[in-house]
Amino acid sequence: MTEKSNSENKERVGVYVCHCGTNISKVVDVEEVARWAGEQPNVEVARDYKFMCSSLGQELIEQDIKEKGLTRVVCASCSPHMHEKTFRTACERAGLNPFLFEMTNIREHDSWITDDKVAATAKAKSLVRGSIDRVIHHEPLEQIPVEINPNTLVVGGGIAGITSALELADAGYHVYLVEREPSIGGHMAQLDKTFPTLDCSACILTPKMVDVAQHDNITLLTWSEVEKVDGYLGNFSVTVRKKARYVNEEHCTGCGICIEKCPFKEVDEVFEAGMGTRKVIYRPFPQAVPKYPVIDKENCVYFKTGKCKACEKFCPTEPNSIEFDQEDEILQIDVGNIILATGYDLFDSKRIPQYGYGKLDNVFTGLEFERMVNAAGPTDGKIVLRDKESTPKSVGIVHCVGSRDENYHKYCSKVCCMYSLKFAHLVHERIPDAEIYDFYIDMRTPGKGYEEFYNRLLEEGTHFIRGKVAEVTDAARIPEEEGKLIIQVEDTLIGKQRRIPVDMVILSSAMEARAGSKEVSQLFKMGCDFDGFFTERHPKLDPVATMTDGILIAGACQGPKDVPESVSQGAAAAARVAGLISRGTVMMEPVRASIDQEACSGCKICNNMCPFNAIIFHEDRKVSEVITALCQGCGTCVAACPSGVITGAHFTNDQLFAQIEGVLWDMSAEKASA
Amino acid sequence: MTKNEKPKLAMYWSSSCGGCEVSVLNIHEKILTVDEVFDIAFFPCIADFKTKDVEAYPDGHITVCLWNGAIRNSENEEMAHLLRKKSTFMVAFGSCAYEGCIPALSNLTSKEATFNTVYKDNPTIDNPEGIIPLTSVQVPEGELTIPEFYNTVKSLDQVVDVDYYLPGCPPEPEQIWAVLQVIVGALLEGAPLPPKGSIVGASNVAVCEGCEREKSEKAIDRFYRPYEIVPEPDVCLLEQGLVCMGLATRGGCGALCPSVGIGCRGCYGPMPGVEDQGAKMLSAIASVISAGHESMEEAELEERIQTVVDTIADPAGTFYRFSMAHSLLQRAKVNGSNGKGEAA
């Protein structure tokens, strides 16, 4: 069939083989591939060139289209992710429909994965032949314009999400900011100081939180979670569950009398990291935004026994703000883009039993120490042991807890060196005569002012010991170790095992992906890596976009990062969205599915298959139809249709079979008979 | 064929069951019309002809040859070449000729294994010396020969050029009559013939179109064999867990099987443009298996899916019951067989 249509209606194919500097040509014999390509059926011209993506390379294609009357173009170079658009545009400039172009990846799929020149060259030929045979069957397609809804959803109210929301709101666009905790602020609100400048974290964060609360262009939805996401770039429809607060936000003035009067306390595992308590009706922290408290239904005595109602009794507002019968609200929000800034979890230090956390009282996690050292925290900023009285005379700070460790996370958590140094400084500041030991594998302080901060700590007299801590124990071997925590470590700079007795140990735990990040990535239909961090479109050149158009990521949900980096990403994602909104319309790939209405039997296999709900069933005619505007071209229905009457544009059976046969050219009869 | 001469009709059987001949005769009294219009030139089932009679015909003498049966042995292949040469229109008649049908299920195994089952390992066989057919054997009276049994069953068009395909196991009598009318119309009144290579006597829409059962969106958590359940009368059989190939099968039969509660077996073959009916059906079934949800761990999900899949008895025989020879697979790789029909 392939042969017949070719002989009847011969296409003129131009093949361009890129050297990519030496990225391709050092392994693939590109001249040979181009020479050979010139001999393949339908090929009018085949060339190799140093950089096809350069202006001169593109001009080669344009010139050949005009002068040699090419009807199809194949470019064998890098991944289509890199330059498909470049070459399509070049074709378009020369008057050729951009979809009559096919890209062959002989870099990522070939030259970068082997040193075997013979095999790599043979593979390049196979891939090129596949593309030549495929492109013959390409059809001209027109891009589809899509209107961009100017509203944006930001998920996560930490510093990254706050930044995104404010940037967009200040640019004049409406933002829905969804946060699952009762207040925005995220992890940054829990911190005392920020490195390396030692700014008071709350002092720099709370003004931004207030801006969010007061901004006309921001609809703040705290104590809320996204349940469902439908649609596509420009037109997402999002279902948000606004959990019952049991406090009426319209009537409540945030006076806090209810909190004061509530007779019951609970250990605050979230904001205070278990170091302090909160009331059953509570605000996570004094500067919480919004100011309205929330009732912890699980622990509320009224909800458990039907008695108490102290909060309601003392609420001074008229009408009363306490609403015990409040129910979750389900909100439907239409937005054009979504920015995910869902943050991180802290590594659970109990997973490393030899460090003693949870068994040895005076082993603290980094977040516990953050709360302890915070002036607004459970100890009013005093550094004390677990008995809440004794001041430690010696403190050991252990780096890389859960990170740079084959057993837990292989990655470097990036912020721990710096926050460990900050801890050391704060101990020096609060307990001037304390001895501080800092155990590090490598000191990583890249960043503006970071190395200088390290030097400052060296001068402040912190004892730096280079080595990974083996164990923290209370089993004393000599009298000096009695009643102490002993840190067993190999000091790699002097090449000796050391046992260092201290009063307090702080574990600098790693940042890790949120529990449930896989579910979140599925909810938003984009990817996450094995560690659970969301996958960016390109690690260097497109760090805030994802492979799903209209879904962006910012902050620590993409990987460990500190405050300035999270802020940069939040702003970058907002800028990207603002750009799309100001364009108003974007052109979408016309790679869409369509159903042959004459041939559809109405079997209803496809109808619940579409992740974008783009397939409708006509009861009167008993046939299904794909709504082109909703279709995202994923191909699920095309594969599922048992009758083969759903076609995916640009991925038709003819195209794919021709490509497969082309790739297998040297296995075919043509070769056998030659 | 001179002006006053009647067109010549032939029907020959190769590897088949004889059902196609019965189906032709099932057009009832219209068979008399066939006899009026055609001279029967070769039709071993109903009239006594010998191969030498056919050999004596000039090339193209037979106007229409309805060939039913797959190519199983060397005799089938020789006759296919002979009748192709002697016929103007060669019609692959019925599923065996069109796509291999039941005989081609033996492409899932080898010639040796087939012989073992038929001549040695079958409980009803008494063959202590383990004799299996040989193409040639010496007896006192001389050499006896029989045709060679091939390792791979082929469809007719894998051996000779075919003009038209008439699907079905067997083709429905009214479809046969409709096709004969088209041919007669063309021969006697000069009406246009369908283009060469056409599939005739069938629809271009799947069997479901003609099936009256109510269809809904599908989510199947286990499959049943027909004897295991009595299906609801008005609900899509596939939704009830009975494998029904109707959605992957060309219509034209009038959805006879699903109408009486038996899942479509798929005998009318793949839809236009589909290369592999079995793979298409598998792909569809894989899309509607209901086994857990997205957030489950991969391993658990895989196990649950496997549990559902395990309830499909004989998947190859179910999905490729009629189309094995003509599918992308064509045959299974068995004991070093090279997949081209020759033993390695």
Image: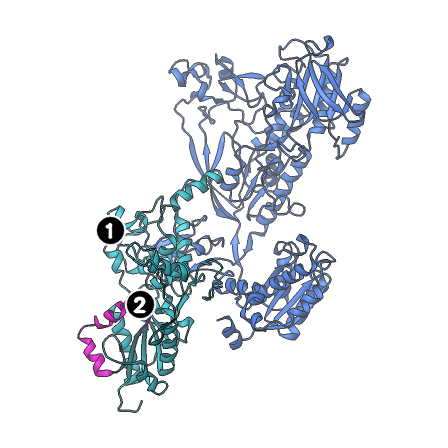
Chain colours: A blue, B cyan
Q: In the image, which disc is placed on residue B16?
A: 2
Which quadrant of the structure image shows residue B177?
bottom left
Please give the name of the residue rendered at 59% of the width and 16% of the height, measured from the top-left corner. Answer: A359
- Earlier in the chain: of badge 2 and badge 1, it is 2
Mark 2 vs 1: CB contact within 8 A: no
Question: Which chain is home to disc 1?
Answer: B
Helix or strand or loop: what does disc 2 sit on? loop
Q: CA distance from mark 2 to mark 1?
A: 34 Å
Seen in the image, is B245 located left or right of residue B37? right
Q: Name the amino acid type tagged 2.
A: Ser
Mark 1 neighbour class, 10 Å CA radius: few under 14, some 14 to 19, many 20 or more: few
Which quadrant of the structure image shows residue A319?
top left
Question: Which one is nearer the viewer's eye here, A176 or A103?
Answer: A103
In the picture as drawn, the residue positioned furthest to the right comes out as: A459
In percent of width and height, residue B106 lies at 38, 60
Placement of A253 over or under B150, stated as above or below? above
In this view, the mark in front (2 or 1):
2
Please give the name of the residue rendered at 55% of the width and 75% of the height, measured from the top-left corner. Answer: A10
In percent of width and height, residue A325 lies at 38, 24
